[in-house]
Amino acid sequence: MKILVLNAGSSSLKFKLYEMPGKRLVAGGVIERIGEEESTVHVEYGENRFEHRERLADHREALAKLEALLPRLGILESFSELGGAGHRVVHGGEAFSAPVRIDGEVRETIRRLIPLAPLHNPANLEGIDALTAISASLPQVAVFDTAFHQSMPAEAYRYAVPGEWYERYHVRRYGFHGTSHYFVSRELARLKGVDASELNVITLHLGNGASACAIRAGKSVETSMGLTPLEGLVMGTRSGDLDPAILFYMNRYGERELTELDRELNKASGLKGLCGSNDMREILSRRKAGDEAASLAFVVFIHRLVKYVGAYAAILGRLDALVFTGGIGEHSAEVRRALCERLEILGIRLEREANEASEDPARPIHASKSRAEIWVIPTDEEGVIAEETYRIVGGDAV
């Protein structure tokens, strides 16, 4: 069975096509700059690459282009070959704690949750609606970034704010990157040959967006992102944690309107705000050359990580493993080394040669005397979406 995985952004449409069971990747790519003067189409399949430019006005035109292009490239005969489609949906609120088959009620609930994710859920809905318009009978499944964190207890997800804020406006901590945290924690258990319920793990998804998750017996019990992805760790362009009174201060004395504060905290803060760049590779290069701003950005990034890992170790009570994933987590030996050196109080010991090596994508990097294991595990969010879609639309167990 062929499963199409879609991740619709505000002006982009990422896709991967899998053959199930077995999760064999058939093709993947992205359509970018949707709605702009010139859109770009990139497709990779086998050893082949295809690139094309034309104007695509909206997601429906982009998906129609993909429907015509895949047969032309010999990847599919037609969309009728598909057994199902899985969509990444950012916010499921309290309504969804697991992936679900999409129907009218699910679509309406995703729409109702737009105030909680105004930048993401509308685009996710556009992808769903565009595919429905092209292939109305194709089963579609929604996989939510927030779902894995619905197991958090109230002491972790409630803010200390007036009860009406939660009861009427649903102000609480939801967490994100749930599909990634779910995957790497399960993959760790698979690699160790144990059940996920036997492990207490801290997973670190470190990329331009970054989050930490404390996982006890296979369930998320705490995570760093909150009502939105702005809370928590220092990220590429997001501030992470800050005193909320800063907003009032900057509104009054910095003469910033709320929309401007929103933009600056999400798009101009984090690593970029500290040193002008949100690319960790550039920051490390500049730091090595003695750049003070880049050095500050790096140590602030690490300091915030130390605070979260230390707190989560205390929450878990017993830490079996620390797992790095995401672009920075998987590829920056320097970030991993700097963090683990600060965690030696927890008995964490890095094996330097294993940390520097990159032959095995998924690998342990801890020293033999380390109290907790340390792993690097590449994430596979699209693969999880493919598996869940295949399971829900009637495939055999994956």
Image (cartoon, grey):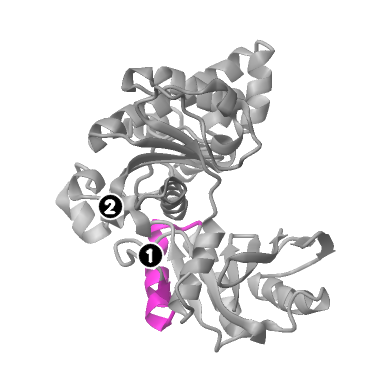
Residue 56 picture location, percent across and down: 74, 69
Q: Which residues are magenta?
A: 100-119
Q: Quadrant of residue 208?
A: top right
Residue 333 picture location, percent across and down: 58, 27
- Residue 193 falls left or right of residue 383: left
Q: Of the numbered discs in the image, which one, if any, rests on residue 54? A: none
Binning the other alpha carbons within 10 Å of mark 1 as few (below 14), some (14 to 19) or many (20 upward) gives some
Q: Residue furthest top?
A: 290
The reply to whether dot 2 and dot 1 touch (C-beta < 8 Å) is: no
Residue 68 is at least partly visible in this image: yes
Camera-nearest residue between 223 and 188: 188
The kind of residue tagged 2 is: Val
Report the residue at 48% width, 26% height from top: 301
The kind of residue tagged 1 is: Leu
- Which residue is labeled 1 in the image? 113
Q: Earlier in the sequence, mark 2 or mark 1?
A: 1
Q: Quadrant of residue 353?
A: top right
- Residue 312 falls left or right of residue 142: left
Q: Secondary structure at mark 1?
A: loop
Q: Is residue 384 above or below residue 157?
A: below
- Residue 213 falls left or right of residue 359: left
- Residue 184 falls left or right of residue 38: left
Main SS class of the magenta portion in the image: helix
Residue 273 is at least partly visible in this image: no
Binning the other alpha carbons within 10 Å of mark 2 as few (below 14), some (14 to 19) or many (20 upward) gives many
